[in-house]
Image (spheres, helix red, strand yellow):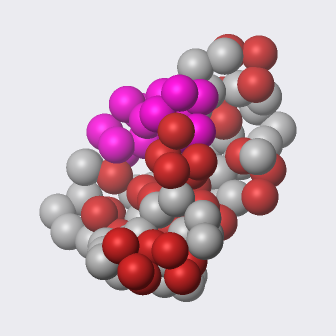
Amino acid sequence: LVKILDILNGSNAINVGRPYRHRVPQHIDWSYAGLNLFKDSSKNVPDSRLKLAKGSPSVALSRGFVEYVTNELNLTTLINIFDSKPFGTDEMIFQSLHSDDALG
């Protein structure tokens, strides 16, 4: 495993594709403001929307990505939304965060 992570050289190994419509919770405000996505509320702008993606739940994430998610983002609302569906949403949280270039 260490050898594989060395080869990745700080890159994320994550499968990303389009989510199945029937697995995406409907009537949700996917804006950063609606999700209260950032711990720094000044970054929760209503005109930026999270771009949803789907992929394998097995991922290899860089330390930088994990630190960013841990230190900068508030995932409480997003996790609660995804948990409202019976299956498939574990394949969307990290994939969506990874795919949204606007997150930084």
What residue is drawn where x is 43% and y is 41%?
Answer: 78
Compared to residue 46, the image places residue 86 above or below, namely: below
* Front residue (pair 42, 7): 7
On screen, residue 72 versus residue 77, left or right, reads: right
Q: Quadrant of the N terminus?
A: bottom left
Compared to residue 65, the image places residue 77 above or below, namely: above
Q: Which residues are magenta?
A: 68-81
One can see residue 21 in this view: no
Residue 82 horizontal/vertical position (percent): 34, 52
Residue 52 horizontal/vertical position (percent): 57, 64
Most distant residue in the top direction: 41
On screen, residue 53 versus residue 90, left or right, reads: right
* Front residue (pair 78, 69): 69
Q: Main secondary structure of the magenta part?
A: helix
On screen, residue 97 versus residue 86, left or right, reads: right
What residue is drawn where x is 46% and y is 62%?
Answer: 61
What residue is drawn where x is 67% and y is 15%?
Answer: 41
